Image: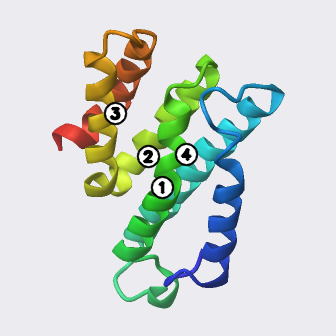
Amino acid sequence: LRPGGGEPMRMLRRLIKALETYMHPSNNGYWTRRLSQLLASMCSYFAERIRSEKLLPPGEFMDGRLGEEDIKEFALLVLPIALQGLFSKSGTVTLQSCTALKHLGFLSPETTLPPLLERVYQALTTLTEVHQTSSALEALAAVIFPLVR
């Protein structure tokens, strides 16, 4: 990705849009594990890039560094499918979504945590969808450090 988005961000947006239906909790098949791994890896590599850019000396590689707006745009783009995967029938998809949410929580807590906490609250207080309780607790465990920071 480039600072300011541009063509790579537009292509990523198209990819995420195409993945949305496949990451729906009721859509389960051989593809769900691979797509959830893609989601978690994408967030992991993005977080690693941001960490490594912050370690660069001031003034070096300034035109290639991603800014806060770029980070927020990425988080807003990926967050909906990470939240969808959270309550998947597949435990692997749930764990990969928690991994993605953990990275998003560190990168952009103000964007990630409010919608996640709202979903977790609903899952913990519902009486009709008790199967969401364990997923909600896993999500809370994943974002506990960004949450208390």
- Mark 3 residue type: Arg
Q: How is the image coloured?
A: rainbow
| Residue at disc 4, secondary structure | helix
The three-letter code of the residue at mark 2 reads His
Q: Quadrant of residue 30?
A: top right
Q: Secondary structure at mark 1?
A: helix
Say which residue label 3 marks.
119
- Discs 3/1, front: 3
Mark 1 = which residue? 47
Point out the frontmost of discs 3 and 2: 3
Which residue position is annotated with label 4? Answer: 81
Q: Earlier in the sequence, mark 2 or mark 1?
A: 1
Q: Which numbered disc, 3 or 1, marks the residue that appears first in the sequence?
A: 1
Disc on res. 103 = 2
Three-letter amino acid code of the residue under disc 4: Ile
Residue placed furthest toward the right: 30
- Marks 3 and 4, the one that precedes in the sequence: 4
Residue drawn at (62%, 66%) of the image: 13
User: Which three-letter amino acid code belongs to the residue tagged 1?
Assistant: Ala
Work out whether mark 1 precedes mark 4 in sequence or the reverse, and give the earlier one: 1
The mark closer to the camera, 1 or 4, is 4
Give the mark nearer the N terminus: 3 vs 2: 2
Q: Is residue 14 above or below residue 5?
A: above
Are there few (<14), some (14-19), or many (20+) residues within 10 Å of tag 3?
Answer: some
Whole-Å distance between the Cαs marked 1 and 4? 17 Å
In the displayed structure image, the side of residue 132 where residue 92 appears, left or right: right
Crowd class of label 1 (few under 14; some 14 to 19; many from 20; radius 10 Å) = some
SS at mark 2 in the image: helix
Task: Tell which circle, 2 or 4, labels the residue nearer the N-terminal end.
Answer: 4
What x and y, as percent, mark residue 142?
A: 38, 30
**Separation of marks 3 and 4 at Cα, in angstroms:** 13 Å
